[in-house]
Image: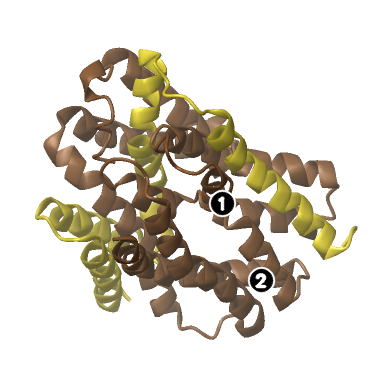
Chain colours: A brown, B yellow
Amino acid sequence: MNKKDFLSGLRDGVPVGLGYFVVAFSLGITAEASGLSALAAFVASASNLASAGEYAGFTVIRENGSLIEMAVMIFVANCRYMLMSAALSQRLSPSMRPFHRFTLSYFVTDELFALNIARQGYVNPVYAYGTLLASAPAWAVGTAVGVLAGDVLPGRAVSALSVALFGMFIAIIIPPAKKNRVIAGLVAICFTLSALAQYAPLIKNLSTGTRTIILTVVISAAAAVLFPKKDDEGEAQNEV
Amino acid sequence: MRYNAYIYILVMAAVSYLIRMLPMTLIRKKITNRFIQSFLYYVPYVILSVMTFPAIIEATKSPVSGAAALAAGIILALAGANLIAVSAACCAVVFVAELIIF
């Protein structure tokens, strides 16, 4: 049973790994511009596992920022992971051994969070480790390769591969939206407000990470007030 | 570089880990407050939607190919295609669309 869960985690993690490799490759180009070696970029990616966060961090390095600035920058860029972790905390079995909380929290990323929370019932640590093993090495190696190889990949291929992760997000949000009208409406509202925020005066000057945090908090809070979840749904948070 | 690269990376990794670890380890109980429960229920959908659009049309060389990928992805997902299929189809649509455009 455990082996089967691990294998299905590995399988689901493969497309994430492919997407990671491509994104990490371009992140590696940024790392190189900040003066990081391939090894340093590898360590940064393996220990952070955060695209926007690492990008922001590399900018701080390039601009000779202070360590405080670095800490604040990473906090803001990765703030959304706090929300994801809090959401995940509600999907952990009370009988799960506590150390899993410390290991699972290492890889709360957009994609792995999405994969794991999309499963029915409690989060299964064994499945989660499968998704991690299939994807995280590609992220770390991809960054190092990006530092070394720069822009050898043809532009056409980079452009095509750059939507791989978005395709995955779509595959995760659309099926529940089909079944639940509130979620369908939310997706439409999110698309609209997110596009508006990109061009609205003042707001557009905020970083992408900050805008994501603000929009997520505001829209989710509004949805929670207007469409509170019924109590009897209890553990059945199984659609996402 | 003002500090050694690995000092910077250590700070990055420490903050990244704490942000993820603290909520997961400190929130041990089932949250009973209905608002917070509903809020956390909606967060995943909202955050993924917000991050998908308009980012998808800015990731590609032309916004048209990104928009085509978005449309194709939504149609396929509605039709019940799995994660890998949707993701691969989005890439293929961008590739073909950009062959036509450029």
Front-lying residue, A52 or B81: B81
Quarter of image, res A177: top left
Depth check, mark 2 against mark 1: the one in front is: 1
Quarter of image, res B45: top left
Amino acid type of disc 2?
A: Phe
Q: In the rendered picture of this protein, how many numbered marks are placed on residues?
A: 2
Q: Residue at x 19, y 41 (%)?
A: A176
Secondary structure of the residue carrying tag 2 is helix
Q: Do callouts 2 and 1 point to residues on the same chain?
A: yes
Residue that carries the numbered disc 2 in the rendered image: A42
In the rendered image, which quarter contains the N terminus of chain A?
bottom left
Q: Where is residue B90 in the image (x, y as percent from the top left)?
A: 26, 65
Dot 2 and dot 1 residues touching (CB under 8 Å) = no
A150 vs A69, left or right, is left
Secondary structure of the residue carrying tag 1 is helix
Mark 2 burial class by Cα count in 10 Å: few <14, some 14-19, many 20+: many
Q: Position of residue A23 (x, y in %)?
A: 50, 66
User: Is residue B53 something that shows in the picture?
Assistant: no
Mark 1 burial class by Cα count in 10 Å: few <14, some 14-19, many 20+: some
Front-lying residue, A48 or A122: A122
In the rendered image, which quarter contains the C terminus of chain A?
top left
Residue that carries the numbered disc 1 in the rendered image: A103
